[in-house]
Amino acid sequence: MSVTTDRLRGLIETTEGELPPLTVELVRDLEIPDHMTIAEVAELTGLSAHTLRYYERIGLVEVPRDAAGRRLYDRDAVGRVVFITRLRDSDMPIAAIARYVELVKRGRDTEPERLALLEAHRDDILNRLHDLQAALAVVDYKITTYGGACGS
Amino acid sequence: MSVTTDRLRGLIETTEGELPPLTVELVRDLEIPDHMTIAEVAELTGLSAHTLRYYERIGLVEVPRDAAGRRLYDRDAVGRVVFITRLRDSDMPIAAIARYVELVKRGRDTEPERLALLEAHRDDILNRLHDLQAALAVVDYKITTYGGACGS
DNA sequence: GCTTGCCTTCGAGCGCGCTCGAAGTCCTAC
DNA sequence: GTAGGACTTCGAGCGCGCTCGAAGGCAAGC
């Protein structure tokens, strides 16, 4: 469970049981103020303020400003950041996320391509899960048979 | 399944069913010549010759040479490389692998620390699996409910 | 009015894990 | 004997994803 989820879990009234998939829809229902400063979003997501500015700089998210020019994340922006964090948690490259965001900007007729992007990423995650399980088996084997200095 | 496993699977006589944990012990039983050139090890593992030299350079593996100074990987060295590849497949940092290798070099009384290292890494893998499953749920949700441009 | 402190922009730097290129050596085939 | 190709060492460079520092702005509290 990622830092993001841990922090968000704390915001949910009922903490028992399994978390539903953490989606932007869910974020909207949380006890999140209408507007958050960059420090608050950093605290919420576990990202640094530096990273949040970086994400904006490279075009992953647009953030409204107050009169003084300071970032004031609305719910929409927070939702985007959380979603991006989720994709990053699963090692989706920033370039792919940027592409996805670009498609969203372009409008509804890019939905098939967005879907394809997500499906390709899902396949990546499944492969990664498979690899990790294989690696886990090796490490577990190594642990349980410890004493053999075999090949290491 | 990693490239390494795919290639090694090809070396195993019976390919049906699940692979046992890919260990150095298993490698020893494969149809692997006594000595392999760097090109052959690269082919076997899917690593580049550059990467194999790099691994040696940073001390992850020691490789015997022939009379002309060329690397001739014996089974032991191949086993080490495969094991390292496994750990890398699970995102174990090179620094941690180097530490492990260092402990092995120091002798048997470092076994408790080695074990601790492996167990810490196993925990990392489990956390990673958990995160990936959470991310997968989000992406799946996004895919199945596609149409909502929600927060992205 | 002045300090404190968080905010801003901008550009540079860093850590990781390779990846590559240059320049030279050695074996094989012709 | 010479051409080709795979090998050697060494050091530099790269792509990614941040991470940091400098220099300055603005608001609140004393």
Image: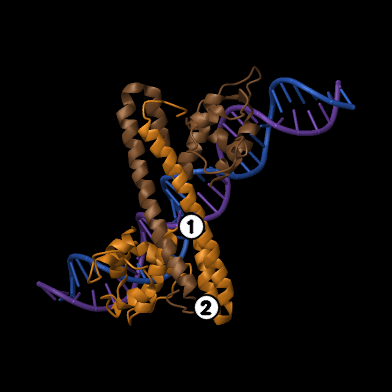
Chain colours: A brown, B orange, C purple, D blue
Q: Position of residue B113 (x, y in %)?
A: 58, 72
Which numbered dot is residue B87?
none
Q: Position of residue A145 (x, y in %)?
A: 46, 75
Q: Earlier in the sequence, mark 1 or mark 2?
A: 2
Residue at the spot x=51%, y=53% of the render? B127
Residue at the spot x=35%, y=51% of the render? A127
The image quadrant of residue A69 is top right
Q: CA distance from mark 1 to mark 2?
A: 25 Å
Q: Position of residue A55 (x, y in %)?
A: 52, 34
The image quadrant of residue D27 is top right
B58 vs A69, left or right, is left
A91 vs C21, left or right, is right
Hey, what amino acid is under mark 1? Ile
C5 vs B118, left or right, is right
The image quadrant of residue A50 is top right
Co-location on one chain, circles 1 and 2: yes
Label 1 Cα crowd, 10 Å radius (few <14 / some 14-19 / many 20+): many
Q: Nearer the viewer, mark 1 or mark 2?
A: 1
Which numbered dot is residue B125?
1
Residue at the spot x=36%, y=73% of the render? B78
Tag 1, which chain?
Answer: B
| Residue annotated with mark 2 | B105
Residue at the spot x=55%, y=74% of the render? B103
Hey, what amino acid is under mark 2? Lys
Residue B141 can be seen, yes or no: yes
Question: Split into 4 quadrants, where in the image is the C terminus of chain B?
Answer: top left
Tag 2, which chain?
Answer: B
Question: Split into 4 quadrants, where in the image is the N terminus of chain B?
Answer: bottom left
Instruction: Name the secondary structure under disc 2.
Output: helix
Camera-nearest residue between A44 and C24: A44
Q: Position of residue A138 (x, y in %)?
A: 42, 67
